[in-house]
Image (cartoon, rainbow, N blue to C red):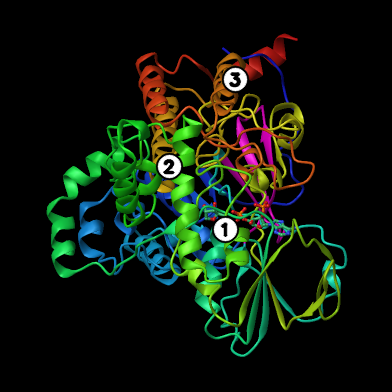
Amino acid sequence: MRPGSSGPEAGSNARPLAGEVDVLVVGAGVTGIYQLHRAREAGFSTLLLEAGGGVGGTWFWNRYPGARFDSESYTYGYLFSRELFDEWEWQEHFAAQPETERYLNHVVDRFDLRRDMRFDAAVTAADYDDATGTWTVSVADGSTYRARYLVAATGVLSVPFFPDIPGRDDFRGASFHTGRWPAAPVDLAGKRVAVIGTGSSGVQIVPAIAGEVASLTVYQRTANWCTPLNNTPITTDEQARLRADFEAMRETLNTSAHGFLHDAHDRGAFDDSDDERRAFYERMWASPGFSKLTSNYLDLLFDEAANDTWCAFLADKIRGIVRDPDVAEKLIPKDHRFGEHRPPFVTGYYEAFNNANVSLVATKQTPIVRMTETGIETTEGLREFDVVIWATGFDFGTGALLRMGVRGRDGLALADHWADGPSTYLGIQTAGFPNFFFPGGPHAAAGNNPRYNGDQVDFVTDAIVYVREHGFDTIEPEPAAEEAWTAMIDRNAARKPSFGSSSYYFGSNVPGKPRKYLLNAAGRPKLFEMIAEIVASDYQPFILSRTSDVESEAASR
Ligand code: NA7
């Protein structure tokens, strides 16, 4: 059932294997924790390797001041256990990083997952052995493990990106990347601080630290359409309602297109009069988090004129908040519409620029020339700093996977296979890499992160249970199925104006990276539909095989 080829002795590592398991998960973030739980519940022996020193993934590394959800806390948490839901009381509608980290540690302990986790265990290589249908996984400390199934839950926003600014390493003050914020407290009080980057992280940290630092200079390359998060504490009544409504909420979150609770609107922008539209936008402005995207006019992302009306409303809001008109104009995006880039949701971001100690440098008008030992030099001169904060984002989508040294059949490196950008089937597997899965990886994102990642983990788990129950050893997608899925993603990604080619969605923030769409442009409903078809067809789009087939093929040659 599979193209015959016997691979090199990829698994024949000189060092002894530290362990052999059915399912090896890489990454102790939201996806990896769930995958470990599901695999163990399904009766597989399991191991999870995590590069960091603790549980949490994104919520372990991104502990910068102001880091918090912009999905509602209870829609982000796990839904697989009613008991877990009942016993954990989220404190805020949008939890801050410490609460999320505590929650994920609680889940790990509650389901006794820690005993299968190894921390400070960065994976440096993963080699597939065709003869045995297994993966050999090497860790930075020299230990190796063998597993039948390898699940990389390594996340899409996990490898920090630093722009190549001349003299970057010359700076002698303290430097931090938001995606690698230290666990030890960072004292910013009274310091001269620079924040480079105004994506979701930059616009969270600016208002969080503006009040304590001596001066704060924000280096903005591209202005973003920021709208209020509208976070509030969860009241006792709301806690009770959440519990009472759990089953209905779970149903909505497990089936909706975006994995949020927000109701979709039923009108287009021009179905309303100017006054009605303005009143509606005021309600949107006051609504929580992502509802500005998910509950907005139906044509917001599909009709440029509709999108323009919302952007004009937002521009007026920014002008109304920021007292200096010149700063306000710089903060208003001029080069993309709402939704083309990942929209940040903020608390007090625009207001921060009304503080005398906060200033803005728009680097397209005033480019950064170089870093020096003492600060940042632009075309207008040098500003000196004690601390530089890099809020400059990540090597999105493929960054972690391509750094893991993954080699599939015949020693094919994933980095070579994806040299022109990722091709996947369902954003879960790629041909030539049997038993290798990457839920929550490229072509996965479709709304509220844990919801679609969870869909993928469920699929992976069901698939490997199917493989086991039907006496197979390996599973990988048919190349044609992968080509069709990837072509569909690329086609859908070309729709205007919802996806901006200048956003990290296309990897365009990283110089030299292939411009390929990295989210699931097919959408979550399409994923559901395809998964149902796959299960009904006994996994037809996949090649299922037995290692004994490989041995007999090899013997007959
Ligand atoms: P983002 O959203 O990728 O933002 C990175 C920011 O860094 C963005 O504003 C970039 O500007 C900016 N950047 C990158 N290079 C430079 C240089 N050379 N000079 C100035 N500014 C630069 O990452 P975040 O960490 O904020 O958010 C990541 C995700 O976390 C987010 O999507 C949410 O899911 C949560 P650019 O726009 O590229 O011009």
- Quadrant, the C terminus: top right
* SS label for mark 3: helix
Tag nearer the camera, 2 or 1: 2
Occupied quadrant, residue 523? top left
- Lateral position of residue 180 relative to residue 23, left or right: right
In space, the residues marked 3 and 1 are separated at their CA atoms by 33 Å
Name the amino acid type tagged 2: Gly
Left or right of 499 on screen, residue 417: right
The residue lying at 39 percent from left, 37 percent from top is 455
On residue 169, which mark appears? none
Quarter in which the N terminus is drawn: top right
Which residue appears farthest toward the top when viewing the image?
556
Q: Give the mark, 3 or 1, whose residue is nearer the N terminus.
A: 1
Q: Where is residue 521 in the image (x, y as percent from the top left)?
A: 51, 30
Would you name the residue on which mark 1 appears?
A: 50
| Residue for point 77% across, 48% down | 14
Q: In this view, does 456 lie above or below 329?
A: above
Residue beneath disc 3:
487
Tell me residue 13's x, y (percent): 74, 45
Task: Give the extent of the magenta segment.
Answer: 121-147
Which residue position holds label 2?
Answer: 447
